Structure formats: structure tokens, C-alpha cells
Image: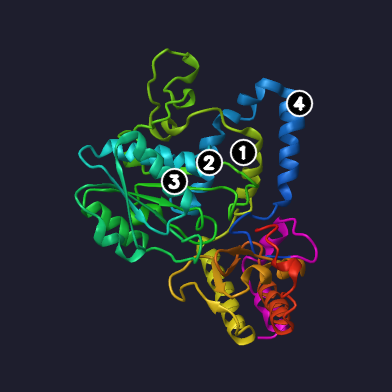
Amino acid sequence: MTLDEALALDAADPLAHCRERFALPDGVIYLDGNSLGALPRAAAAAMADTVERQWGDDLIASWNKYDWIGAPQRLGDRIAPLIGAGKGEVLVGDSTSINLFKLLAAALAARPGRSTILSETGNFPTDLYIAQGLTGLTGATLRTVEADAVEGAIDGDTAVVMLTHVDYRGGRRHDMARLTAAAHAAGALMLWDLSHSAGAMAVDLRAAGADLAVGCGYKYLNGGPGAPAFLYVAERLQDQLASPLSGWLGHAEPFAFEPDYRPAPGIARFQAGTPSILAMAALEAGLATFDGVSMSDLEAKSRALSDLFIALVEERCPDLTLASPRGSRGSHLVFAHPHAFALMQALIGRGVIGDYREPDLVRFGFAPLYNSFADVWRAIAVMADLLTSRAYDQPHFRQRQRVT
């Protein structure tokens, strides 16, 4: 493929106009939106307005005047169509880890007589850490098996199956509907971590019959570093489950200031403390970048970008070995190279920003709203030059001073 052919693909791209919604630095090809989304152009103004006008001028009245108090559910309803959820099924707030703790604890309590959390050995480490911490509090057991063995490992003691929809390292994508059905057939609940899929592909929690889900706001949702996370609880389960963090904003009447806790109806019971309004303002700007976007178009572009990247790597960078699935996968790719760390540092030095994963993987993420086919072509041109010239083989690139 030539650069002109890549530019022609961009000209025909139904999402090409979305690139203008982001403030992307000149001279940079950003292929790390799977770790931190790019800055939406509207975010700085939204945060300034929240600080200077809402907080500055209207002070405490802003909780009602600008519906600060309703932000967790309002933003949840904006995320819902991106993940195949309904109105009132998604709540924004806290971190992915805290939300995972809430939902795992709720799932264990909802399955008395069962004591196993089942996951895969290669799951994202913090998910496993949270589950390990919870077992120490509840007496439950965390059982991990290889990814291909999960379905067969679900048994009568499994209370909840916890999986990440798209593997953070290699990009393998689980069959959400099949594994959810398998969990239900054994009487277990199913919890999905959508951190590496929400905002990059079409996700349909309702169609899959999923019970619970969590996800972060700072990757493909473009909410900024440390953005609030989200949780999903299927409407049919909301009044059956109890959050272990019975904070005041999850109370049925938080401003009644009653001494005893009564859970709010619906998704609101999973709220704990006061929402971070400044962070919510940035996330809301990030979610606005999806306005008018078809999730099927989003997924189609994600696949087309990664397919093109694979084809060009195999044509021009034969020293790299694909370590991601060719079939069902998410929106990032990893390739093995014996000098992967140095290669990635050299790429970053030339304005191509991806990241590195131990022990020998370079990783590239494709954010369909702002990455282009020309980005892919130019990134491969830079990488091919570095590999051919061995310009990456320099001491300053090998020094482990930073890992993006």
C-alpha cells in the first residue's frame, strides 16, 4: 500500500471527521490510546467552565444548578449505548479497582453456598489483586486457569466468573455471549472488565446476557489521566445485590442523614462517596467525542486499522513477530522483538508513540475516533527505517528510564 492509497482510505472513512474533536500534537503519531486517550478539544474549556463559572460563581448552588449531584448517573447513561446497556444500568465514579471490589463482593453475597471467584491466569493483575484481597476478607477462594480452560472450569462452587473482555497484553477477545451463557448454566454470575474494549469496539452487554461489568474512563473513552471509572449492573439484578461500600450517596435518602443505612433503589445503591466533579467534567467532554458515532463503524475501523498494520509489518518489518491473535481480538496489537524496549524508545524518539510490555513486546493501540490509515502507514515507515538501520541499538534507548 502506498501513502496515497492510505490517504484515500481516510477520505472514505465515515469517522474521519471525529479526528478534529481532539487536540493531537503536531509531528506525533499516537498509538497508545489504549493506555491513555488523547485530549478532547472541548475538555480544557469544560474544566475551566466548571472551575471558574460553576464553582467560582455559583459555589455550592452548583450541586443542583448544574446537576453535579446527578453526574454519576448522567454520565453512566452516556456510556450505556457504547457498551450495549440500558438507561439506569451504568454508574460513573471511583476507580475500576474499587468498582470491581464492589461487584465481586456483591456477587459472592448473592450466591450463598458458593465460594469461588473464577478467573484466568493472565488476567490484568489488578483484577486478580482485588480478588485476592477480597478472599482474605470473605473466606472465598480465587481460582485461576488458562484462558482456554475457563469455560470447562465453571462448576457448582463458582459464585462469579471474572474476565477481561480484551486481554491487556496480547489483545485476545473473549466470546462474551458464550462464556456468559456457560456461567449462567452453572448458576454463577458473570462479571466483565471492559477497560480495553469500551469505546474501541461494539460491546453489547444486554444481548450477551451479562450480569456485571466494570471499565475505566481514561483509555478509549478519552476522560483524561485517572478519569472516573464505571460499573454496570443489569437492571434485573440491581435490587437483589448489595454494595459492600454503603456510603451516604448510595443511601435511599442521602440528605435525610439517617443513622442507619437503607440502600437506594436501582443503580444508585452502588454509589459510595461524593463524585469528583472536576474529573467528571473532563470525562463528559471525552464521552461527547462519541456523539453521532455508530459503534459498528467504530469496530469496523478498528479492525481495518489493525489489519493494515499487520499487513505492513509483515511486508516491511520481518524482524517483528505478531503475538496477537489474527482472529478475534481487540483494538491493540503486540509484536515480539528481541530488543523491544529499545525499539519502542527509538520509535517514541521519532514521534511514534506506542508502549512496551515485558518481556519482549511492542504494543500499538488504535483509537478509531482519531487514528487514521495514514498514521498506520507513516508509523510503519518509521519503524522499518529503524529496523533496517538498527538505529534503535543505542545505549540511551536500552536504558530502562521510562516505560510508557
**Amino acid found under the numbered disc labelled 4:** Gly
Task: Indicate whether residue 22 is drawn in magenta.
Answer: yes
Q: Looking at the image, can residue 74 be seen?
A: yes
Determine which residue is flagged by label 3: 129
Mark before the other along the chain sequence, 1 or 2: 2
**N-terminal-most mark, 2 or 4:** 4
- Would you say 385 lies left or right of 292 here? right
> According to the image, label 2 marks what residue?
95
Depicted 145 relative to depicted 65: above or below: below
Disc 3 crowd rating (10 Å Cα; few below 14, some 14-19, many 20+) is: few
In the image, which disc is placed on residue 56? 4
Q: Which residues are magenta?
A: 1-28
The percent position of residue 162, horizontal first and vertical second, equals 37, 51
Per the image, the residue denoted by label 1 is: 280
Q: Amino acid at mark 3?
A: Tyr
Judge whether residue 197 is colored magenta: no
Q: What residue type is disc 2 on?
A: Ser
Q: Give the CA separation, mark 2 to mark 3.
A: 14 Å
**Disc 2 or 3, which lies upstream in sequence?**
2
